[in-house]
Every structure is written in structure tokens, then in C-alpha cells.
Amino acid sequence: MANTSVQTEPGTRRPGVLQAVLLLAGSCMPVLGSVLLTPILPQLSAEFGGAPGGEILVPMVVAIPALMIALFAPFAGQIVDRLGRKKLLIIAMFAYTLVGIAPAFLDTLPAILATRVGVGITEAAIMTVCTTLIVDYWHEPERRAKYLGLQTIVTTLAATAFIAIGGAAGAAGWRTPFWIYLAAAIIAVPMIFLLWEPNKADPTDSHARAPKVPIPWRRIAMPLIVGLFGGFTFYVLVIEASYLLVDAGVAPTDTPTIGGIAALASLATAAGGFTFTRIAKVGVNRILPVAFALQAVGMLIIWFVGGVPGVAVGAIVGGAGSGLLLPSMLTWAVGSTRFEERGRVTGLWTAAFFFGQFLTPIIMGAITAAVGSLPVAVGVVGIACAVAAILLGFGLRKSNMAPAEEVTATV
């Protein structure tokens, strides 16, 4: 792969390292929004927990962007398909910085939640466009699967760094981590000069000459349902790990410890994503059940072992499953899409996945109230993951989903 984009003939460009770096870096922004603040959730609970509805609203500081992504990603997909990719991405990156750092200056929970709505809306555009451009720029099935796998690896490695940075910054106060959102503006500047808008005259996309087509609902219905459930299970340990550790005896102000354990789990997620790039040729129909099974094992370890060691080991095992899960679901959903439907399908899948994330604190709160303990609630979700693994293992074996040539990754 070349070090930059290559002009092969008039109107034709080939993506290179710089384009890959920028799109993968942009893909990290929604991850930044979801994990950066998890180490300071106990501090936010101490600061705002006494406010009306504080027990539910404080976790929403992390979760509400996911709702906005779920609501607005389909619209971002419509804009991507109709009006283009690049302009939307640049505007969203700069807007993301402004709403991201705003809570550093705010003193009330409703005002902070309002800015988090803005974070989610801009994240919807960023995630949809970055994923769509990855599929646009690398249209060969092998490279497409490779870069979708790399997207998971890079974003989870970034999540590891963001969790650790958020934990370290949180030691200086809960406001400090919000300044890290300035990273989006820094990344946006080279995007202006190094990314380009794909068009139907560009032969680097083999699907570009097809007429406009409707959304393939029958083909994507099951990937959307699994994406919704997978978004929920993916986020359970992300949002609950700090509370599980506090329940196990870690001080709420010990953000380096909380962030460190969360970072180890995130590294395991990155390892799972890297594993996907090596085994994608096996087929999504085999990888998806394994991913849910690993999540189940991790959550059941948290339930039955308990304590700080149980939470740490369970989060690592579950994180490895999440690393396999995300690129598998995404490849299944968008790997065989055509140019004219790609933005909309990507937006719909992104909406399903992040709506599952938004539902996480609500569902976990209801399960915890029903069973009386957060570790037991996590175990219940683990049982659900085990059931999903079994159903997918039998169901997808007999289906025609995601043929091997669509997901092959040769790295």
C-alpha cells in the first residue's frame, strides 16, 4: 500500500496510508465519547447524584450520545448517499470538538446532558461517514474486511488509551477529561486536504455505476436485530465496570485503578479485533457465536467469582468476545452493499448498534432492581449471550448469510 493517495489516471485515486490513518482516527471519536468518561462516573455520581433522577441521569452522560447516534445515524446515512461524504465529516468533526469540551465550563447536570446530545448527533455523522468511506475506498472484499477489522482494532486500542487518559485526567477533577475532545479538531485539519469525495465516475469503486436502489430490508433485517442486541452486550461491561469495581471495594476516587482495569479489558477487545482480521475467512456465521460465547463466559465469571479479580478477569474475557463481535456484525451488515445503498445501510446498522448501547443503563437498572445485585444482573446478561450464541450457531449454519468470499481477510 502506498504512503499516500496515488493518482493513476484522470479522476482516479487510490487510497493509501494517510487516508487509512485519518479514517481510522475519525472512527475513534465515537469511542472517545463513550469510554473517556467511564472512569469518572463515580465522581459524577458524587457530584450530581443528589439531583432529581441522578442515579439514572449520571450514567446517561455516557449513554445519551448512543441514543443520539441511534436516532440520527439513519439521517446521516441519507445525507451521505445523497449529498456526499467529505463535507459532512469535516463539519461534524469541528462541531464535535465544541460540544465535547463544553461540560468543562458547566455546573448543572441538565446542561451537561444537553451537550452530550450534541456529541451524539455529531458522532452519528462521523461514524457513518468514516465507515462508509472505508468501504468506498477499499472496494475489494479482502481489503474491505481487513480495514473493517482494523477499525475495531484501532478503536479499541484508542479506547484503551482514552480510558487510561480519562482515569489519569480524572484525578485532577471530573472536568479535566472533557478537554481531550480537542483531538477531533486536530484530526479534522488534515482530513480537509487528504480525503476526497467518491463519485460514480471513480472506478476505484466497482459498484459506482449501478442505478439508485432501495434499502435491502430483507437482507439486513437479521444483522440489524443482532446489531441491536450486540450493542447492548458490548456496552454492559464498558458502562458497569467502574460500578462493579466500586462494589468490590475500590474507592470511587481511585480512577487510576478503575481506568487501568478498564484499559486491560479494552486491550482484550483490541486483541479480539486483531484475531478477526486473521480468521475472517472462517466465516461470520462461525465467528459470531464464538464472540457471544466469550462475552457469556466473561460475564458469568464476574457473577460467580466476584471481587476485584473476578471483575478484572471477566472483563478481559468478555472484552475479547466484544472484539470479535463488532467487526463480525459490521462485515455481515455492510460487506456486500452497493455504492448507492451503502451509506443508508451503514447508518441503519450504526443506529441499531448504538441504540442497544443507549438501552444498556436502562435495562441493567431494571435487571439489577429485579435481582437485587449488579453482579447477578451481569450474570443474567451472560446467560442471554449464551442463548444468543447457541441460536446463532444453529441458525446461521443453515442460512446463506455473508458468504466466505465477502468476509475473507488476507492480512
Image (cartoon, helix red, strand yellow):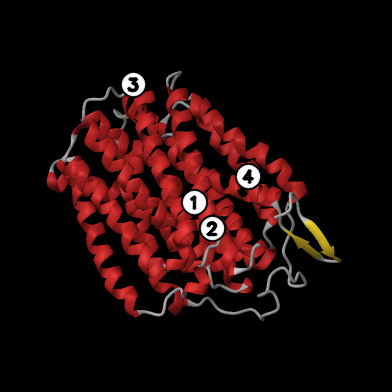
Image height check: is 339 above or below 242? Answer: below
Q: Residues within 10 Å of mark 3 (few under 14, many from 20)?
A: some
Q: Quadrant of residue 60?
A: top left
Residue 116 visible to an observer of this rendering: no
From the image, tell me which residue sits under label 4: 93
Q: Which residue is mark 3?
A: 253
Q: Earlier in the sequence, mark 1 or mark 4?
A: 4
Query: Which amino acid type is shown beneath numbered disc 3?
Result: Thr
The answer to whether mark 4 and mark 2 are in CB contact below 8 A is: no
Q: Which residue is mark 2?
A: 148
Q: Is residue 249 left or right of residue 89?
A: left
Between circles 3 and 4, the one closer to the viewer is: 3
Q: Secondary structure at mark 3?
A: loop
Q: Earlier in the sequence, mark 3 or mark 2?
A: 2
Q: In percent of the image, x 35 and y 36: which residue is there?
A: 58
Depicted 44 relative to depicted 70: above or below: above
Residue 160's label in the rendered image is: none
Mark 1 lies on residue: 152
N-terminal of the two: label 4 or label 2? 4
Sequence-first disc among 3 and 1: 1
Percent position of residue 131, x then y: 57, 58
- The amino acid beneath tag 2 is Leu
Indicate the amino acid at tag 4.
Met
| Residue pictured at 29% horizontal, 36% vertical | 312
Depth order, front residue of 150/179 = 150
Where does the image place residue 185, in percent across and percent down from the top left?
A: 65, 38
- Which of the pair 84/47 is nearer the observer? 84
Specify which label sits upstream in the sequence, 3 or 4: 4
Is there CB contact under 8 Å for labels 1 and 4? no
As measured in the structure, the alpha-carbon distance from the residue carrying label 4 to the one carrying label 2 is: 21 Å
Residue visible at 69% across and 64% down in the picture? 83
Distance from disc 3 to disc 2, alpha carbons, whole Å, reads 37 Å
